Image: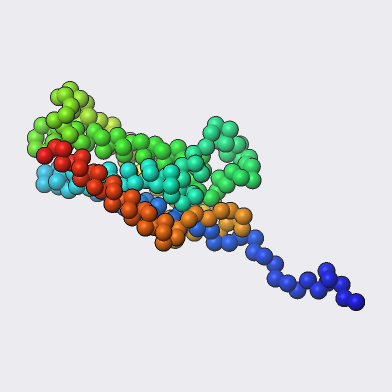
Amino acid sequence: MSDPAAANTDEPMLPATRAVRVWDLPTRLFHWLLAVAVLAQVVTGKMGGNALDWHFRIGYCIFALLGFRLVWGLIGGHWSRFSSFVRGPAAVRRYLRGEHRPDDHFHVGHNPLGTGSVLAMLALLVAQVGTGLVADDEIASVGPLNKYVSSATASSATAWHKGAGQGLIITLVVLHVAAIAWYRYRKQQHLVRAMVTGDKDLAADVPASDDTRLARLRALALIVIWAGLVASVVKLGG
């Protein structure tokens, strides 16, 4: 009579890891479009003159992208949701001490330090969009909502938009790029590749983000809605 245990010795072992869809397509497109748009904003802002027309247009695109991301952070794929990476003080302490619980998944999406960078960037960009909408450079460029605020508010908004706000965003971008390089060469983690393909090699029990056709259509509808809302806001200045 054969031994059942011996009969199973030739069965293939299940892989310890598998390709897990971490970043859904809408999140990846948001990331790269925002990166290009922010770079273009810095360039057009420094150029001035006729380039400021494009500065405003690209700013409106960033407005729509930010609105999309804030809502997508509630209804998007698992690892794109704020609930998956915005953590409390206890989780941050565990991360800094090199400790973790099985359900922490610090290595999957954004770790606690990366989360701080993401939230800071979103907050700063929201501030830049808001101040840009009411700014007045007292030369030729006026935000579409400038007429709804006092001259003192417009002056303060313009100073922030052209000064501290821009400087902080550039600083965060530089730190972001430096962090990516550090993870690539010191920890051998290809963060850029994951944001291009959407996948990471992870433990089999790590949940994947929803990246189905239906989810993508939902994201498309969301960005169209936000584009319409932004257009309506801009028309208020007409």
Residue 102 % position (x, y): 64, 46
In the rendered image, the quadrant that contains the N terminus is bottom right
Report which quarter residue 173 is drawn in.
top left
Residue located at (42% from left, 56% from top) = 215
For the C terminus, the image quarter is: top left
Q: Quadrant of residue 63?
A: top left
Residue at x 9%, y 38% (from the top left corner)? 140
Residue 65, image x, y percentages: 31, 47
Query: Of residues 127 and 98, which is closer to you in this image?
Result: 127
Residue 15 relative to residue 183: left or right:
right
Residue 119 horizontal/vertical position (percent) = 41, 38
The answer to whether residue 237 is seen in the rendering is yes
Using residue 2 as the reference point, say whether residue 107 is left or right of it.
left
User: Image quarter for residue 97?
Assistant: top right
Tell me the residue at 37%/58% (across/down).
217
Q: Residue at x 83, y 71 (%)?
A: 4
Along the line of sight, the residue nearer the viewer: 180 or 102: 102
Q: Nearer the viewer, residue 125 or 177?
A: 125
Residue 91 rendering spot, x and y as whole percentages: 57, 36
